Amino acid sequence: MKSGVDLVGDIGEVLLTEAQIQARVAELGAQVSADYAGRRITLVSVLKGSLPFMADLMRAITIPVRIDLMEVSSYGGSTTESSGLVRILKDLSASIEGEDVVICEDIIDTGLTLNYLVRYLGGKKPASLRICTLLDKPARRLVEISVDYTGFTIPDQFVVGYGLDYDEHYRNLRFVGVLRPEVYASVG
Amino acid sequence: MTSGEHTSEGVAASQEPSAPAPFAHASEAEMARILDFYAVRWDYEPHTFPILWNLAGDVVESFTPDFYLPDLDVYLELTTLKQRLVRKKNRKLRRLRELYPSVRIKLYYARDFRALLLKYGKLALVESLTGTSGQVVPDRPSEDAGIDGLAAVAPTGVVPTAVVPVAAAAGPVGRPAPRAGRRRAPEATVT
């Protein structure tokens, strides 16, 4: 199927190289390992964007790790227009009661999704709940969220790659790049 | 004003849950839908903050943020005007922050709102939801109605002399005037 997407050509600027990402993820893994030394943690990946990040982060962590996956509907998504309310598309596979949980996010901008998830997961009575994000875009924040581990604080630009998408494309780029405005400007 | 004065219970006193919020702009309605979607409670224009008084102590200018999010104790103001046209709103916001330093308020500019629509795949709606084309209530009471009155007592160029310190202004210090704000409490439950 032809997509019309120029995977690399649509990128105006590489914001974070693969090497930069891998180095920072290794640091985050070491930090998490030190903070939870002697314990076991559950990493919860928020699909789909955080999948590459969690895959790398879990391998950079040197303490016992469980992983689980969650997916919530996004505002404007075609599957949720009828309800008008966020929905859990995929819930956790196992209980997190009494567990030390670290939410893995690809990016935090408005904080709306994470605010919902923190409340939702907090209701499952974990022993602790922390947040680890690869990217933080504080300029867009609507809901203040306390982030425990941040890979990079980035400027207010629309980025794709390393899990982040635009219209479901570009997730498989190994770097994080700024999408050329003309790629989405034609839509508006 | 302290954040304690803005508990959700306090705001709830002015809620009118059965009536739909009369949004002044399509962008505000869209923002309300977004907040609803993520189960963030909001009140629409529940408070008016006086920001300028004349020598008689009358309020001549005020600022009414679009939303108050009671669970987060933060106000949200949307402006979808072009960046060069938001100088007046920026000035009012600076004044609000000077007079009410404990009030937490976020200003979402047109570029922020556009980015929000892009994020949610609704960029195609940007023209209909922003700027003058997004206005759905053409005639609203102006928050600057008193400015003309101010001009009567303070000629152009000496406006600062007419500004009454908060402590000398009528009404409780730092307390915004309540408005008949509308509240929406999303039905989504978080367990």
Image (cartoon, coloured by chain):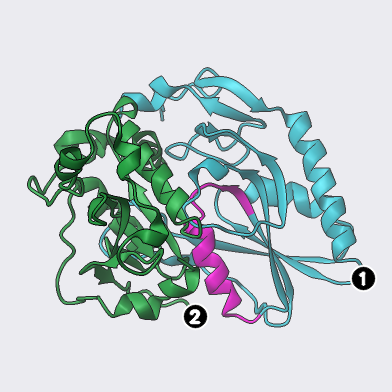
Chain colours: A cyan, B green
The residue that label 1 is drawn on is A38
Asked whether the viewer can see residue B37, the reply is: no
Give the residue furthest to the left.
B139
Residue B162 percent coordinates (x, y) = 30, 44
The boundaries of the magenta stretch are: A105-125
Q: Secondary structure at mark 1?
A: loop
What is the distance, in whole Å, between disc 1 and disc 2 at their CAs? 30 Å
Residue B139 percent coordinates (x, y) = 7, 47
Nearest the viewer among A127 and A174 is A127
Give the residue furthest to the right.
A38
Q: Give the residue type at disc 1.
A: Gly
The residue that label 2 is drawn on is B191
Nearest the viewer among A142 and A152 is A142
For residue A115: magenta? yes
The subunit carrying tag 1 is: A
Q: Give the residue type at disc 2.
A: Thr
Residue pictured at 11% horizontal, 50% vertical: B140
